Image (spheres, grey):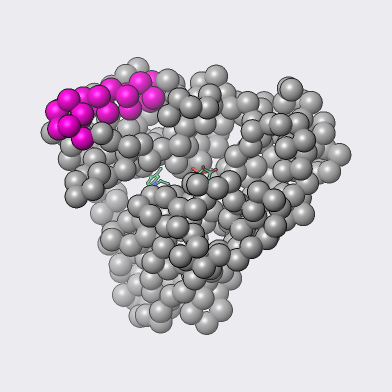
Amino acid sequence: MTGKEIAAILAEHLDERYIHPDSPMSDCCSFRTGGNALCIVEVHNVEELRKVLTCVRKKFLPYSILGNGTNILVEDEGYSGVCVMLQGEFTKVDVTGYEVTAGGGASLAAAGRMAADMWLTGMEWACGIPGTIGGAIKMNAGAFGSEMSTIVKRVKALTTAGEEVFLRPYECHFGYRTSLFCEKKYIVLEAVFELRKGDKNEINATIEKYAKERRDKQPLDLPSAGCIFKNPKDNFAAKLIEEAGLGGAHEGGAMVSKKHHGFIVNTGTATAADIVNLMNRVRNEVYKNSGVRLEPELIVLGRPGRY
Ligand SMILES: Cc1cc2nc3c(=O)[nH]c(=O)nc-3n(C[C@H](O)[C@H](O)[C@H](O)COP(=O)(O)OP(=O)(O)OC[C@H]3O[C@@H](n4cnc5c(N)ncnc54)[C@H](O)[C@@H]3O)c2cc1C
């Protein structure tokens, strides 16, 4: 099926403005490279999401929810499926008492900022993570000793059967950079975070301290997807990569950052293949040097089974 064909089917249910056949994923991914998606579609509420999923499943097409694209890479050959972006209702953030309620497509940083404005502490660490609520829940994103699992009170999700369910934290199976949403193709519609009352000046000072640490230690001037590998138990991927002498190693336009060895950056001309080749080389050389097998944190979309 072509992008135009699936777009025509989706246009029976959605405004054409929100359907983008044969769309370059390099515009939607923080690595700023990669091939086209068969179709990118923006949905604004659960009803539209259900309609899109029904159409896509009827045609046996693969699909993936696209957050801010800060932890994915699309292969150069493209993704022969539909990427669904959660917009409209899904981007709302609301604060009531000590609770922050945010849609699956809302910005994690914006939710953290809003919490800070309301004198709520507990999300300062999240303000520098460039993903959406949905992407952060799926990845159990974390930084500076905290992670999503420490603040989640409940998650509203859409199951593969199209049912809306409320999940408590233990039902989300949170682990290090993983969750139930990695096991099952459930979609995060909304999450509620439970925070504590804090001092606004202290909260803002902590946010600024963490932002400075990122600016000082991370190559934020070049496209990347953050840390590319998970930290192995009781160790650090960046340290193992440095010990293997891989700082500055490159394949085409992809380079292991010299500023933070856990990052692979796009120096301007990297193809997705350059990034994947460099990841493979780093894994092999780290294994040879330390006996540790690094596991990618990055999700690669394209041909199934390659990673
Ligand atoms: C400069 C930089 C710094 C970073 N720092 C950190 C950090 O400190 N800590 C950290 O953990 N990560 C970090 N990351 C990685 C990334 O920001 C996180 O993993 C983030 O949570 C991904 O969110 P996203 O919306 O961009 O998800 P995407 O990359 O768009 O998607 C990631 C996965 O989540 C799925 N997904 C997205 N939305 C939903 C949804 N609503 N329901 C179900 N599945 C969904 C996608 O299908 C995909 O499988 C960094 C990245 C960059 C570029």
Q: Which residue of the protein is positioned furthest toward the right in this rendering? A: 12
Give the quadrant of the C terminus.
top left
Magenta stretch prevailing secondary structure: helix
Q: Is residue 105 above or below residue 15?
A: below
Give residue 39's position: percent from left, percent from top.
68, 32
Residue 254 placed where, x, y %?
34, 24
Question: What are the residue bounds of the magenta stretch?
Answer: 274-292
Task: Look at the picture and state if 270 lies above or below 101.
Answer: above
Q: How many marks?
A: 0
43 inside magenta stretch? no
- Observer able to see residue 48: yes
Residue at the spot 27% in from the left edge and 28% down from the top edge: 283
User: Does 39 sit left or right of 143 as displayed?
Assistant: right
Quarter holding residue 124: bottom left
Residue 250, percent across and down? 28, 22
At a point 42% along the width and 20% down the height, the residue shown is 273
Quadrant (top left/top right/bottom left/bottom right) for the N terminus: top right
**Can residue 107 be seen at all in this image of the molecule?**
no
Q: In the visual, does 49 lie left or right of 68?
A: right
* Viewer-side residue, 147 vs 61: 61
- Above/below status of 119 relative to 295: below
Q: Nearer the viewer, residue 272 or 172?
A: 172
Instruction: Report the residue at 45% width, 25% height from top.
Output: 306
The answer to whether 82 is drawn above or below residue 1 in the figure is below
Would residue 51 appear left or right of 299 to someone viewing this image?
right
Question: Quick one: 295 or 213, which is closer to the camera?
Answer: 295
Q: Quadrant of residue 80?
A: top right
x%, y% of residue 155? 55, 64
